[in-house]
Every structure is written in C-alpha cells, then in structure tokens.
C-alpha cells in the first residue's frame, strides 16, 4: 500500500512538471471586460541560440475613447517548460496599448496564445 502511494505521488509530480509552462498574466479580468485582441504567435524557424518576436496591441486609429486594458494573458503552448518567456516592453495594464517581447529558450521554438482584455 505504501509503495502504491509513493508511485502515485511520483506520477502526479512528473505530470505537473510536464504540463507547466512559462505562461504569464498581468492584471485581472473583472465583470464587464471584453476581449480586445486575440493572437497566436508561433516561431518554428531554424535552431538558433535565441528567437524573439514583438507583439503589439494598439487601439483602432481615431478611436474617441480607446479601451483601458485590464488583463493580459500570454499562455505558453509548449509543454515541459521548453517554450519561451513573455515580458512587457511598453504600455500594459491601465493603459490603452501594450507591447510584449516573446523570447524562446536557447535552441527551442515558442508558441504563445495572447489575450488582451479591457473595457
């Protein structure tokens, strides 16, 4: 019985590590928020030391009152933490725009799903 419990703990621990990615969240969705932008950013190019990409959300040109960003989600879609990292370069929560830099781990690819919410 003790060995079964130990095996179960080990299997669950390994599965949690394999599922865990480098997803990031800034801000929090609240009642009344709407999805401002949705994007999937993928880089599967040749193996180089580091791949990076810039994602920008800008409100529509000429908007009278651009929406205020309340939450940004950058979900890493590659399992086992081999994907990449996301960081805010400019703008962000409580602003009307955001610029994210997406960077891969050395000699790896990345695949992010980005969601921007606001009101």
Image: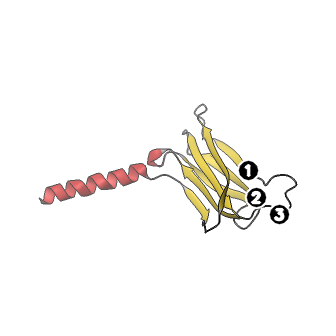
In the displayed structure image, the side of residue 109 where residue 95 appears, left or right:
right
Q: Position of residue 109 (x, y in %)?
A: 56, 39
Circle 3 residue: 65
Residue visible at 44% across and 47% down? 80
Residue visible at 48% across and 52% down? 21
Q: Quadrant of the N terminus?
A: bottom left
Circle 2 residue: 97
Q: Earlier in the sequence, mark 3 or mark 1?
A: 1
Instruction: Tell me the SS state at disc 3.
Output: loop
Distance Cα–Cα, label 2 vs label 3: 12 Å
Distance Cα–Cα, label 1 vs label 2: 8 Å
Residue visible at 54% across and 55% down? 23
Q: Position of residue 11 (x, y in %)?
A: 28, 51
Residue visible at 59% across and 48% down? 113
Q: Earlier in the sequence, mark 2 or mark 3?
A: 3
Q: Position of residue 65 (x, y in %)?
A: 83, 63
């Amino acid at each position: 019985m003790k060995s079964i419990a130990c095996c179960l703990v080990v299997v669950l621990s390994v599965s949690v590590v394999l599922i865990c990615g480098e997803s990031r969240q800034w801000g929090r969705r609240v009642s009344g928020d709407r999805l401002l932008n949705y994007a999937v950013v993928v880089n599967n190019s040749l193996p180089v030391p580091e791949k990076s990409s810039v994602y920008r959300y800008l409100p529509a040109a000429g908007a009278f009152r651009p929406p205020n960003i309340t939450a940004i989600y950058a979900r890493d879609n590659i399992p086992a933490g081999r994907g990449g990292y996301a960081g805010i370069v400019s703008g962000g929560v409580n602003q009307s725009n955001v610029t994210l830099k997406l960077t891969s781990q050395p000699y790896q690819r990345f695949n992010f799903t980005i969601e921007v919410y606001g009101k």
